[in-house]
């Protein structure tokens, strides 16, 4: 069930990321759902010499949420998790929160949150370890996704997925092992840029960059991350030479 963390925005509240002119609905009101299993566990392969994994997880989620909040095509941003700490983070960021009853998996969490929204608005599900996202990156992705019933963005490795977009309320995501193949097998269209310009290729490289290892983090930093991840890395002893 939808819950409201103390002082946070309830899932069923009339919340939008951007304000439309009086009397006019926001254009293309996508709903963003960001599933997070835990803010303190996971990322066992991410062994940064100077930054704890839980600090990186929170920074990644923060940058992912803020990218959604800064995308005019996204009308609602919902963080879904069984972790109470995620409710506190949602409160601090100003996004909506859905308390997942149990750790049932990414796909089940997305489906549960989407069902609780009671809305036929198009949905974009985004993994919380995508710190290179920004408002313009998501705008580029959604410009392609709006023309497809179901679509997805593959990850940098070419085997997984970072995002799943649906204009079909009955569709379901297939994140997990080899999700790129599973999404394609289930009819989702793999999204790509219209034109291979340097600017477009950079946007899509950022859309595909999830972070599971220290090498991934280095590449994300090279591409450009959101401020939470950037400041965390820049302030670490390895970055400052301490």
Image: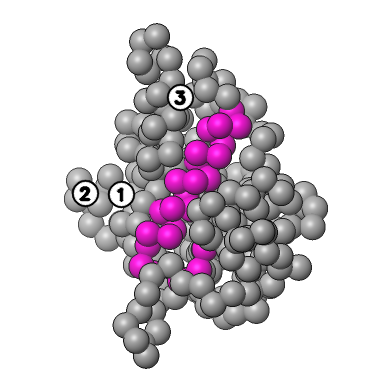
Q: Residue at x 50, y 53 (%)?
A: 93
Residue 6, percent across and down? 66, 59
Q: Residue at x 40, y 84 (%)?
A: 25
Does the magenta portion include 44? Answer: no
Q: Residue at x 61, y 61 (%)?
A: 7
Does 218 sit above or below residue 179? Answer: above
* Label drawn at residue 203: 1
Q: Visible in this render: residue 183?
A: no
CA separation in Å, label 1 and label 3: 20 Å
CA separation in Å, label 2 and label 3: 23 Å
List the residue tagged with mark 3.
Answer: 215
Pick whichever, 20 or 36, lies toward us.
20
Q: Does label 2 or label 3 sit earlier along the sequence?
A: 2
CA separation in Å, label 1 and label 2: 6 Å
Q: How is the image coloured?
A: one colour
Residue 82 vs residue 36: left or right? right
Q: Which residues are magenta?
A: 53-77
Residue 70 vs residue 103: left or right? left
Residue 79, percent across and down? 59, 57
* Label drawn at residue 199: 2
Answer whether labels 2 and 3 touch (C-beta < 8 Å): no
């Amino acid at each position: 069930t939808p819950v409201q963390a103390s002082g946070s925005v309830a899932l069923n509240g009339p919340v939008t990321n951007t304000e439309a002119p009086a009397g006019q609905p926001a254009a293309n009101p996508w709903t963003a759902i960001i599933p997070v299993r835990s803010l303190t566990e996971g990322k066992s392969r991410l062994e940064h010499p100077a930054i704890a994994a839980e600090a990186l997880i929170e920074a990644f989620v923060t940058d992912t949420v803020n990218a959604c909040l800064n995308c005019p095509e996204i009308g609602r941003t919902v963080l879904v998790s069984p972790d109470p700490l995620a409710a506190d983070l949602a409160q601090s960021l100003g996004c909506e929160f859905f308390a997942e009853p149990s750790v049932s998996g990414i796909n089940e969490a997305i489906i549960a949150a989407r069902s609780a929204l009671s809305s036929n608005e198009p949905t974009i599900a985004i993994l919380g370890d995508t710190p290179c996202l920004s408002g313009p990156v998501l705008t580029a992705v959604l410009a392609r996704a709006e023309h497809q019933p179901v679509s997805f963005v593959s990850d940098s490795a070419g085997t997984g997925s970072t995002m799943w977009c649906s204009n079909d309320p009955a569709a379901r995501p297939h994140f997990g092992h080899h999700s790129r193949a599973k999404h394609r097998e289930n009819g989702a269209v793999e999204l790509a840029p219209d034109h291979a310009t340097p600017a477009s290729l950079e946007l899509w490289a950022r859309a595909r960059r999830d972070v599971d290892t220290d090498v991934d983090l280095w590449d994300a930093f090279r591409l450009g991350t959101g401020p939470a991840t950037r400041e965390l890395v820049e302030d670490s002893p390895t970055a400052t030479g301490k």
